[in-house]
Structure formats: structure tokens, C-alpha cells
Image: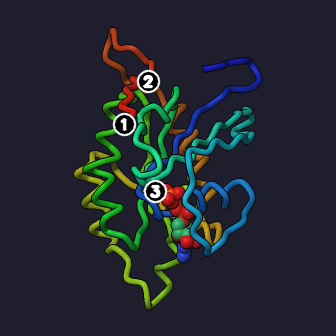
Amino acid sequence: MELTDATRELNIVVVGDDFCGKSCLIGSYLTNEFSDEYRPNMHETHFTEITLKGKRYNLNIHDIPGSDSYCKVHPCDYPQANCFIVCFAINDENSLKNIQTKWIPEIKHSCPEASFILVGTKSDLKNSPSQPVIPLVQCKAQCKSIGVKSFLECSAKTNEGAQKVFETTIKTVLKPVKRKPGKSQQCKCYCSIT
Ligand SMILES: Nc1nc2c(ncn2[C@@H]2O[C@H](COP(=O)(O)OP(=O)(O)OP(=O)(O)O)[C@@H](O)[C@H]2O)c(=O)[nH]1
Ligand SMILES: [Mg+2]
């Protein structure tokens, strides 16, 4: 990772099931734009700068497709990841379950040193009577079983919480992490191209 006095470069990887709102979250953060149209994507990288507490950061934001049919080599999409934003949609129980069964195990296997935060997307749907959302207590229970204290909520549609997600990500990276002595800090990459 490039480190200079002035600027630090950070790799942020956004993962979660397809349709859970990753690309919209990134779009909301970068341009404050939102579309109802669903456009599944390949791995895309976005570049931006942010100043936090007087320090500048160059962010490489990796938008990873949620569907395996678009990419079967997820761990290779995690180059030098500093932090993962692990997303689920608050109206999709499966996307929450898959955090525990798929995304966290994959991250821990391929990038055991990287930190991660959990994000519940589409929070605007809480105000929509036609869209049942996962009860908060269930989200919290799932967080507990994953071993994290809490999760952030955001809406790409209203832009609420999008900035906070990325600021929290950076703060999480900057927190000193207790590491086991002798362990490599490199991202472990395994490829199974089929
Ligand atoms: N109501 C609401 N809908 C959202 C929000 N974010 C995304 N959506 C909708 O959810 C659908 C999927 O959003 P995407 O951001 O493309 O999902 P994705 O996780 O990037 O999906 P893949 O690229 O296939 O992995 C789109 O139709 C969006 O309009 C949100 O905050 N609120
Ligand atoms: Mg996408």
C-alpha cells in the first residue's frame, strides 16, 4: 500500500448478494445519483479522494458483482483489500443469511487481515408499507452470531447514511488491529478459474 506524508491509498471492497444495492450505494456516495433500474455489473473500480480529520485518502472502491455467474474468482478480486463493506438489503433475508454463510467465510479465507463493516442497504424501505423489512432484532442477532457489534444502515435512494458508510470504513481501517505474531499482512489470493 502506498503511504506518503500527504496521502494514503486505501482499497475498499464492496461485497454482498446480487441486487442488494452495492453499486447504488457507491453511486450515491460518489455522485449522489440513484436509478431504480437494475444494471448488474462486472468488477468495477472507482477512484475518489476524501479528507478525514485533516488527512487525505485516495480511495479505490471495488464494486464486486454479487452473482457467481458474473465472476467465479471472487478472492482474486480482493487485491490488497484494507476493508470490506459487506452489504445486505434490509428487505431480503437471504442476503443477510448469506453474509454469514458466504461472504464472511470468503473474506476470512482470502483476506484474513482485512477489516470489514456490515451495512444494511435500502433503509428507505422502512417507510414503505408495501415492503416488509427484516426486524431490527433479527439483524442484531445475526450481527452477534457473526461476531460484530453493530451494522450501519443507508439508503442510496435518499442518500441517507452513504457518506457515513465510507467514513466509518476509513476509521475502521485506521483502528489498530491486534495481529497474531508472524502472520503475513498480505491478502491471501486463491484462484479457481472454471
Ligand atoms: N428502494 C431502494 N432501492 C434500491 C436502493 N439501492 C438499490 N436499490 C435498487 O436495487 C436494485 C439493485 O441495486 P444494485 O446497486 O444494482 O445492486 P448490486 O448489489 O450492485 O447488484 P449486482 O451488481 O448484481 O451485484 C436496483 O433496482 C436499485 O434501484 C435503495 O437504497 N433503496
Ligand atoms: Mg452492482
Quadrant in the rendering for residue 33: bottom right
Asked if the residue at tag 1 contacts the one at tag 3, i.e. Cβ–Cβ closer than 8 Å, the answer is no
Residue 97 sits in quarter: bottom left
Q: Nearer the viewer, residue 135 or 54?
A: 135
Q: Quadrant of ligand 2?
A: bottom right
User: Where in the figure is residue 152, as x and y percent of width and height?
Assistant: 47, 58
Extreme residue in the front direction: 194
What secondary structure is marked by label 1? Answer: loop
Q: In terms of sequence position, does the residue under pointer 2 or pointer 3 come before the other?
A: 3
Question: Residue lying farthest left?
Answer: 145
Looking at numbered disc 2 in the image, what kind of residue is underneath it? Cys
Q: Dot 3 corresponds to which residue?
A: 119
| Image point (31%, 65%), residue name | 94
Q: Identify the mark nearer the N-term, 2 or 1.
A: 2
Residue 149: image location, x then y, percent: 34, 50
In the image: residue 4, left or right of residue 156: right
Vertical order, 159 against 48 (above or below): below
Q: Quadrant of the C terminus?
A: top left
Asked whether mark 2 and ligand 1 are closer than 8 Å, the reply comes as no
Instruction: Give the alpha-carbon distance from disc 3 to disc 1, as whole Å.
Output: 30 Å
| Residue indicated by mark 1 | 194
Give the CA distance from mark 2 to mark 3.
Answer: 22 Å
Locate the N terminus and report the quarter of the image it occupies: top right
Q: Amino acid at mark 3?
A: Val
Q: Position of residue 50 (x, y in %)?
A: 73, 41
